[in-house]
Amino acid sequence: MVLWTVAETAFTEMPPLLAIGWLLLLLGAFGWLSLRWAPACRGVRCRALLRLRKPGAAAVAALAAAILIFCFQLAIACLLVHYGQLRLQVPDHGVVQQYLNRRWGWAPVAVSFVFVAPIIEEFVFRGWIQHSLERRIGTWPAIGIAAALFAAVHGNGPADAFHFVFGVLAGYLVYATGSIWAGVLLHAGNNLSVMIAGLLLPERLGTPDGMVSTLGVWPLAVVAVVSGVLLLRLAGALPVRRRRPHWMWSARPARPGLVQHGAG
């Protein structure tokens, strides 16, 4: 993942159109290498292994959850910083910010944060890692380990807790829906929310203290409580998709109406 981060951020040295092509090339290379490393991943078995089924109605739930997660984490972070319980280490995005000021610079940044990164990270953490561990150590331990690794890769000091919470929610969504694409939509929606907020929010709301002083403590507390409750209700409403054991993935379903009766 470190090599992926270096390769992904290399686009800031390229013109926007070339940068988009570079990012799509990285995505294609990831897909090819994934299949090369898993030669048994073919056809129906591959779709089951990677949970490639369509998200269906879960797509709406994933996008709604992305907005709720963004609101919840933003409100909680602002309140914790305001009361001195959290010291955020803001990552240096100066190079990306400079790239955004270029003509059409926003396009490759959006492709990276909202399209390429969510697909690759969800396939790695909620696909290969979590799903492989589920069959060995159980669902919740697997979700927890994948979320912890996800937070470690995004290492940002105390803010790792927010990445861990996001990883747990994404992991449960993928498990409950049986679709990796639900996790991708959740990840993309969350990244898009962060990107839009960073571009559109006025400067006085650009820091936690500025947001608290402008909006007030109680409105942020209400946002945190309401978004948290709605997230829990949304998670509880997800129907857990029952899946066959992995050794049955290639089994053909029985054809109805072909039961043989004895001549008794």
Image: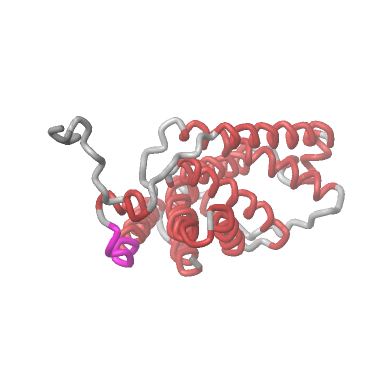
Q: Nearer the viewer, residue 188 or 44?
A: 44
The correct choice, above or below, for 120 with respect to 209 in the image is below
User: Which residue is painted at 67% across and 58% down in the image?
Assistant: 160
Q: Is residue 238 visible?
A: yes
Direction from residue 72 to residue 257 in the image, left or right:
left
Residue found 71% across the figure and 44% down from its top? 206
Query: Is residue 34 or residue 205 the one in the foreground?
Result: 34
Residue reaching furthest to the left: 263
- Residue 8 in the image: state x and y as whole percent: 45, 60
- Boundaries of the magenta span: 33-41
Give the side of residue 21 with respect to residue 237, left or right: left
**What quarter of the picture does the C terminus occupy?**
top left
Q: Residue furthest front?
A: 264
In this rendering, the answer to whether 225 lies above or below 209 is above
Task: Decide: is 33 above or below 174.
Answer: below
**In magenta segment, residue 152:** no
Residue 41, picture quadrant? bottom left
Q: Position of residue 259 (x, y in %)?
A: 19, 34
Is residue 181 among the parts visible in the rendering?
A: no
> Would you identify the image quadrant in which residue 158 lies?
bottom right
Pick whichever, 55 or 219, lies toward us: 55
Farthest-out residue, bottom: 3
Q: Is residue 230 above or below residue 161?
A: above
Which colour style is shown? secondary structure
Residue in view at x 80 percent, y 44 percent: 79
Q: Position of residue 28 (x, y in %)?
A: 32, 57
Residue 194 pos. (x, y %): 60, 44
